Amino acid sequence: MTFLQPKIRLVLATDLKDILEISRHVWEGYDYLPFVIEAWLKDSNCYTYATEVNGHVVGIGNMRLVEKGRTGWLEGLRIHPNYRGKGLARAITEHIIKQSQRLHVERLRYTTGSENQASLKLAEKTGFVRILEMGVFWHPNPNDVPLPRNYPPIEISSPEKIFELTQETPELNSHGILIYDWKALDNTLEGFVQVGKSNEFYISLRKGKLDSYSFGRLRSESKESMWGFTIYANQNDGFISHLSHQITLASRNQQKAIMCIYETKFEKALHDVEWQSKEHWDMHLVLVEKTMP
Ligand SMILES: CC(C)(COP(=O)(O)OP(=O)(O)OC[C@H]1O[C@@H](n2cnc3c(N)ncnc32)[C@H](O)[C@@H]1OP(=O)(O)O)[C@@H](O)C(=O)NCCC(=O)NCCS
């Protein structure tokens, strides 16, 4: 493997053409980067770095300060296919790690797919550890899923109420981290409020205690929009009820496709659903973290 000595610097508006060229090759053109890059450049919480070889940007990576600057959220790491395997992603990540120390960030986090060997290897090499794993399920056109009988009703909720309820039921989210839309925030009031800026919350109570909850939103940062949601539940009946509810919300929002993030303990329940169309995919999402010295 040839290691390149790249120049790493902040991204400029004039780099957009090169960045779109990198993005074109990612996830068969379904990359979200073109939909967010201009907002990143205007966002004072974002530190977006480019790696330049022979005058062209061939790699990019963003760190967003979240949780009042305590966490550096890493996202959008991309290397042009012609330049992969040459240590560029590692160089950009190490650069971000150094910058994050300057900014007194306490920890860095990112999510990646469990099959993304390069990204997982990179995490290992740069001192990140695995925190948790969740399932991710996509369906382009799911049928209605019948509500389980005798399950308590699903009600709309607020970040404040749901935060209060989750404090009494820590078993519902054992890691204390909310996973939404491939992102993560601690299960704090601030975290719920942040998620609530773009998501609607739904809860079900049993004997006055929180039994299950979900939150979802329209995801439009891709060539094709979809309804994306996360479900946390005690048991299968709560999980299936929220799945059914979120699929109804998807169609109310004129969305055919869904992306469901769920706890892996519901993998079997999800696969036992009699989907009319077999055309669906799933994988695991892995959250990794590096604690700064
Ligand atoms: C993931 C990605 C950024 C890696 O970029 P890269 O410049 O090729 O990575 P590096 O050369 O710095 O390699 C980092 C480590 O991963 C390993 N690696 C790289 N590609 C690999 C692959 N395809 N399979 C297994 N390991 C791989 C390298 O060997 C290296 O480990 P080492 O130091 O032990 O040799 C690049 O593949 C990419 O842009 N992929 C598409 C977008 C994506 O998946 N982004 C990450 C989303 S979280």
Image (spheres, grey):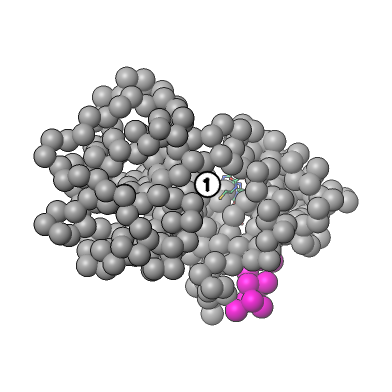
For disc 1, the neighbor class at 10 Å (few under 14, some 14 to 19, many from 20) is few
- In percent of the image, x 29 and y 67: which residue is there? 164
Q: Is residue 193 visible?
A: yes
For the C terminus, which image quadrant? bottom right
Taking depth in this image into account, of 130 and 140 the one nearest to the observer is 140
The residue that label 1 is drawn on is 117
Task: Tell me: 271 left or right of 28.
Answer: left
- In percent of the image, x 17 and y 60: which residue is there? 209
| Magenta span dominant secondary structure | helix
Q: How many marks on residues?
A: 1
- Mark 1 Cβ inside 8 Å of ligand 1: yes
The reply to whether the magenta stretch includes residue 262 is no
Residue 263, image x and y in percent?
31, 49
Q: Over which residues does the magenta segment extend? A: 93-104
Image quarter of residue 20: top right
Task: Tell me: 288 left or right of 104.
Answer: left
Image quarter of residue 267: top left
